[in-house]
Image (cartoon, rainbow, N blue to C red):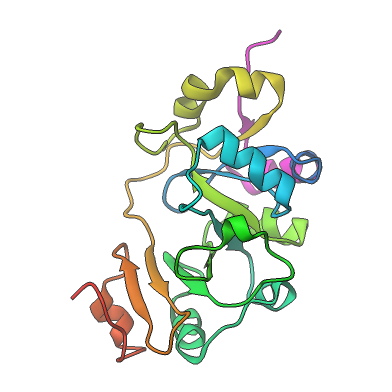
Amino acid sequence: MPEPRGVPFWSAEEVESALAPTIAHLQAGGILAYPTETVYGFGTMIDRDAVEALVGLKRRPPAKPFLLLISDTAMLARLGLNLTPSASMLAARHWPGPLTLVLPGGERRIPERLRGPEGGIAVRWTPHVGLQRLIAALGDPITSTSANLPGQPPAVTAGEILEQWRQEIGRGTIRLLDGGRLPPSPASTVVDCTSRVPRVIRPGALPSATLRETVPELVGDQ
């Protein structure tokens, strides 16, 4: 078996070359490892079988769902997700960017495994240009969770993923997109928008004070 390696996913030309085989891999239920604006992530299509395959790979407990990455807000409507007034204002100001919004809705389109304890679905419009292009070409969101074994730090290079998941990449279970070394970056800020008052449930790259400039009623992360 040839030594497994990542698929170049850095320049615009590399991204375009990677699109068709990557989309085919996802549509066949495969798991994708890809660069984001923060760390490398694992993702799949959002159908139940693909999500369960990722749950098994990550050994993910049921109470910890994956978030969804989108390339435009039109995807939210197709999924039946609702942008509440506060979520709409935050999205208009900070998307694409390091802000994850937990939104109500999606009962008919999204597997319940992706629904968090707040009752919503976590969504982020990624600013990573290559990933945006892939999701737009796919026409659907992909799931996202950090690409690392339990207890290991999130990967910031494709090489770290190869070290931990060499067999799965060699078998074709995981397709690895190599976007180079990612610069150190804090995780996205997560805001629960399922209730009347939006609430920060994970501090991150966007300070609460900055978010309150748009939505003064925001609570949490004082």
How far across and how far down the image is residue 33, in percent?
58, 38
Q: Is-magenta flag for residue 94? A: no
Q: Quick one: quadrant of the C terminus?
A: bottom left
How far across and how far down the image is residue 138, in percent?
76, 56
The residue segment tinted magenta is 1-20
Q: How many marks?
A: 0
Q: Position of 182 compared to 11: left or right?
A: left
* Residue at (44, 27) in percent of width and height: 160
* Quarter of the figure with residue 186: bottom left
How far across and how far down the image is residue 13, in percent?
69, 44
Q: Position of 171 compared to 126: left or right?
A: right
Q: Residue furthest left?
A: 222
* Residue at (63, 24) in percent of width and height: 169
Q: Is-magenta flag for residue 6? A: yes
Decide: is 148 above or below 195: above
- Asked whether the viewer can see residue 144, the reply is yes
Decide: is 219 above or below 39: below
Q: Residue furthest top?
A: 1
Q: Quick one: quadrant of the N terminus?
A: top right
Decide: is 193 above or below 180: below
* Residue at (65, 43) in percent of width and height: 52
- Asked whether the viewer can see residue 9, the reply is no
* Residue at (33, 68) in percent of width and height: 201
How far across and how far down the image is residue 116, in percent?
49, 63
Residue in front for this viewpoint, 189 or 198 = 198
Q: Position of 50 compared to 8: left or right?
A: right
